Amino acid sequence: RYKGDDKSYKTTSKYRDLHIPVQYAVIVDESHPFGLYSAMSFTAIILAAGKGTRMNSALPKPLHRVGGHAMLAWSMDAARLAGAERIVTVLAPGSEDIQDWLDGAPFAIQEDQLGTGNAVASAREAVGNEDGVAIVMFADTPLVSAASLKQLADGVKAGAGIVIAGFRPDDPSGYGRLVEDADGTISRIVEDRECSPAERAIGLCNGGIMAVSRSSLFTWLDRVTNDNAKGEYYLTDIVAIAQADGAAVRHAVIDETEVMGVNDRRDLAVAEAALQARLREAAMEAGVTMIAPETVFLSADAVIERDVIIEPHVVIGAGCHIGEGSIIHAFSHLEGARLGACCVIGPYARLRPGTEAANGVKIGNFVEVKKARLGDGAKASHLTYLGDAEIGAGANVGAGTITCNYDGFGKYRTLIGEGAFIGSNSSLVAPVSIGAGAIIGAGSTITSDVEADSIAVERGETRHKPGGAARFRSLKTKAKQRGT
């Protein structure tokens, strides 16, 4: 779903259909960002109109990536998996980059930046006020899970007017507190700076995300005032209004990491670390061996089958599928690669998008592969570049071989037949075809097609000068002595 241009760092992403890796869809717990649940339908309102100035970036904050996906994509995925029938993203004016990324998904514009209550009110027309549930969530809390959203929605379905996501951090200072009545309902939300000593001792904190009865949401928002120091309309003020109307306000406790907000690059790194820990754990539970898991980095959509072994310092980027029993040796970098069973990759291999390897393929140390297909048992063991190529089953590509696929204007394909042998230090100038079973002599530069079972050798003539080396050294020594 995500496709980025790293050179300009401008997004070309489009929000399309969900793609959930098999192992992560099956192995799920409440702390994991993925989950497949049978839940009541609801409307999700995702607030994404903040300026994000602390990111100090030309890229809008919601499009910064965690685990290879935009933070906004994480929120949308969690909402859909929890049962959202409609997702409305609230944006600021001038948010064309995010609008383009949404690719037709519904959004609303918050014309004036007047607080969270004003932001939600901006979605009134897109959401409507029919019976049901609305969940207000954020584009910069990428780790919220579908399980938690379902828990909030189910609380409103059970009769509450509002259900607030709460969490219990080790140190609650700095967070707003959820003040409970004796029966467990929430009487009010108090900001940390306004807490009394007794309220400051409360460990239950406001996570910001809340589910609200959709038929009441905008009625309550209409009664929120901006009588505060900032002159803004706060969503949290609907708690007191709901209680005044006799509606129950409850809470659901979720993990602290799920409401982790990303405000700057430091927060982004913390969120990435938390997500990577989850992805590694899920992979290992699915039967993947990681020798030093803390050094392995996974894109969230990577599919890694059982009995794969991943050595230290490996990056598995977006769009990868690694077949059962494969070994990824240390310091290898994979992106957009699909591997069959029992492949051996690296160490120090780079697999770029479009790499397709069948079963038992070996791509060894310092080999780079781009937009190339390798058949069963094909080998490129070391120091090789294979770009825009098709390599047949059982072919052996020697060290130092390159497919010369680019002439400065266009890309051209190299075809290597089954069982062909490419000698070391060969240059295959595309477009060119090497027939099945053919042999290319080491050091050859091949510029024309080679028939099946042929031997092709294309080298300059070797000239020998007996004693020439001694004469050369003597002349150079005398010249050095003369200072010339």
Image (cartoon, rainbow, N blue to C red):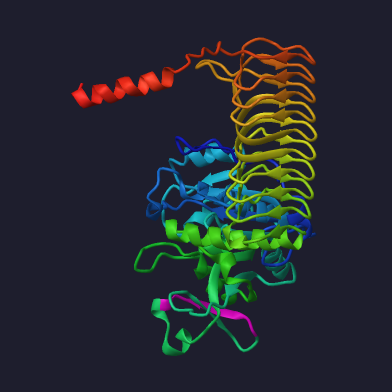
Q: Quadrant of residue 220?
A: bottom right
Which sits in the foreground, 301 or 215? 301
Closest to the observer: 336 or 202?
336
Q: Position of residue 212 (x, y in %)?
A: 63, 64
Q: Is residue 246 above or below residue 106?
A: below
Left or right of 229 in this view: 461: right
- Check the picture and name the quadrant holding the C terminus: top left
Q: Residue at x 75, y 48 (%)?
A: 326
Residue 288 location (% of width, % of height): 73, 57
Q: Which residues are magenta?
A: 184-192
**Residue 245 placement: quadrant:** bottom right
- Residue at point 78%, 55% (across, down): 307
Vertical relation: 76 (above or below) 141: above
Query: Residue at the location (58% across, 49% down)?
Result: 331
Q: Position of residue 141 (x, y in %)?
A: 55, 59
Residue 209 visible in the snapshot? no
Within the magenta stretch, is there residue 187? Answer: yes
Task: Give percent across and percent down for residue 462.
Answer: 54, 13
